[in-house]
Image (cartoon, rainbow, N blue to C red):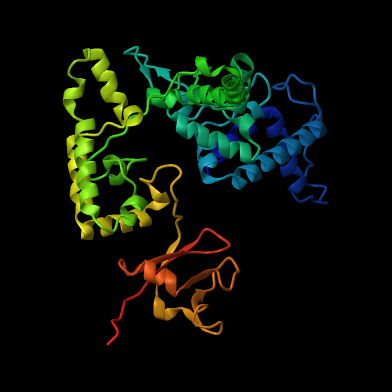
């Protein structure tokens, strides 16, 4: 065990003369007594403290002190044995001076002669340079933590990792706030040190947001900055609020009603759109006016490019491509491309076959219908008749909406010619 230096320091504090006197008294008591008168009895020694001791104690008092010192030493030995090996090794090399009486000068160990305090840097006697402490700050923190757990922290030498030093540092500098460097320098990059200030600014902005919203609502409309919205219209996608029908200036319903000559109507609309949106109409305007007109033409004057008009005419003039375009408008999410006021189809379209639906012919030939239940709870939410199928016979598809909710269903069917 690494406790000999510690116990030796404790034994050296007992009076040497008293220890010698006590040992001789013990030997005399242990010597066998003889009744033979020819053997002289040992002379009675002075029961007072020898001249080497200046305390004036009696032998009994020294025996009592000696026993107390031995008991205390045994307690320290048992305490040292209960400590972890790391603390035992440390106290064996640097015995704690706080357990010795005041004014005692115990013999120093070899480690103490080289470095009296292993927790502080030492100055070399020859070169004059400062050397690092034997225990680094990390190892000092480990030693202090172990000693604190076993209740012997006060036996350690002074260290900056000790509880007493840290409490004094807090009293002087206050609690350290992360990211501000109060009391000591904060390591890390600049963005890491500025995390706390940024979070504080963000918190203040969020707390002030309700007040700013109230102030914004109280402002008159003229004081609010106008938001300039621009739309990028391409030949393929006319953009939100515009379809190929609106580019040519016709409606889908009007074209469907014109069963005689729909191609002539589309062609006249095409020439009319070219004349209305010709670029030569803006040649006489000032540059600023022309730029403003070009920016706002999509929203105010409905001016379109030649490419958009040509693409619209090419798609609508062909019956097959026009039918595909109409189906794409019907299936567009949220009916993008339809103007406000036109019929808006809803999302949630389910594709089914006509043969998968229930057929009801109990009401006669005029009341024959196909139906299907909807998940909203209506057993006949999707309901249509033979007349609805005849209207959609060209597309071979029929869109049916639920009577109680916003769900839609697309019915696929085929027309069988009668022999």
388 over 293 or under it: above or below: below
Across and down, in percent, residue 356 comes to 43, 79
Quadrant of the image occupied by residue 242: top left
Residue 222 visible from this viewpoint:
yes
Residue 300 picture location, percent across and down: 35, 27
Extreme residue in the bottom direction: 419
Q: Is residue 216 left or right of residue 39?
A: left
Image quadrant of residue 162? top right
Q: Is residue 276 above or below residue 311?
A: above
Q: 21 or 348, which lies in front? A: 348
| Residue appearing at x 22%, y 58% in the figure | 319
- Which of the pair 71/76 is nearer the observer? 76
The x, y position of residue 85, in whole percent, is 52, 45
Q: Can residue 114 be seen in this view?
A: no
Hey, which residue is sitting farthest front in the picture? 260
Which of these two is toward me, 374 or 8?
A: 374
Name the image quarter holding the C terminus.
Answer: bottom left
- Left or right: 228 as drawn, with respect to 273: right
Left or right: 288, with 223 as reference point? left
Residue drawn at the location 65% of the way across and 45% of the way down: 78
């Amino acid at each position: 065990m690494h406790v000999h230096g510690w116990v030796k320091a404790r034994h050296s504090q007992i009076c040497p003369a008293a220890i010698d006197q006590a040992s001789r008294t013990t030997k005399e008591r242990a010597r066998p007594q003889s009744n033979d008168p020819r053997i002289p009895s040992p002379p009675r020694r002075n029961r007072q403290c020898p001249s080497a001791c200046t305390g004036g104690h009696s032998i009994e008092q020294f025996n009592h002190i000696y026993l107390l010192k031995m008991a205390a030493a045994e307690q320290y030995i048992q305490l040292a044995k209960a400590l972890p090996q790391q603390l035992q090794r440390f106290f064996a090399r640097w015995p704690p001076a706080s357990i010795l009486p005041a004014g005692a000068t115990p013999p120093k160990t070899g480690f103490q002669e080289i470095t009296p305090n292993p927790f502080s840097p030492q100055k070399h006697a020859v070169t004059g340079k400062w050397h690092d402490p034997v225990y680094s700050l990390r190892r000092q923190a480990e030693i202090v933590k172990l000693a604190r757990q076993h209740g012997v922290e006060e036996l350690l030498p002074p260290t900056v990792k000790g509880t007493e030093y840290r409490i004094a540092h807090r009293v002087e500098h206050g609690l350290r706030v992360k990211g501000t460097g109060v009391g000591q320098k904060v390591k890390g990059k600049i963005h890491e040190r500025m995390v706390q200030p940024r979070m504080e600014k963000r918190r203040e902005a969020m707390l002030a947001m309700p007040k700013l919203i109230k102030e914004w609502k109280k402002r008159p409309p003229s004081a609010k900055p106008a938001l300039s919205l621009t739309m990028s219209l391409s030949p393929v996608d006319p953009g939100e609020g515009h379809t190929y029908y609106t580019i040519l200036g016709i409606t889908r319903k009007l074209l469907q009603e014109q069963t005689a000559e729909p191609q002539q109507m589309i062609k006249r609309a095409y020439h009319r759109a070219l004349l209305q949106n010709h670029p030569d109409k803006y040649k006489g305007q000032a540059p600023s006016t022309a730029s403003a007109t070009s920016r706002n033409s999509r929203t105010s004057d409905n001016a379109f490019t030649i490419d958009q008009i040509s693409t619209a005419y090419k798609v609508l003039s062909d019956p097959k491509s026009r039918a595909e375009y109409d189906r794409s408008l019907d299936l567009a999410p949220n009916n993008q491309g339809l103007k406000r006021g036109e019929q808006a189809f809803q999302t949630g379209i389910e594709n089914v076959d006509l043969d998968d639906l229930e057929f009801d012919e109990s009401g006669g030939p005029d009341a024959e219908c196909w139906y299907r239940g909807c998940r909203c709870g209506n057993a006949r939410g999707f309901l249509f008749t033979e007349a609805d199928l005849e209207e959609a016979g060209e597309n071979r598809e029929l869109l049916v909406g639920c009577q109680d909710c916003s769900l839609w269903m697309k019915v696929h069917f085929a027309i069988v010619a009668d022999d």
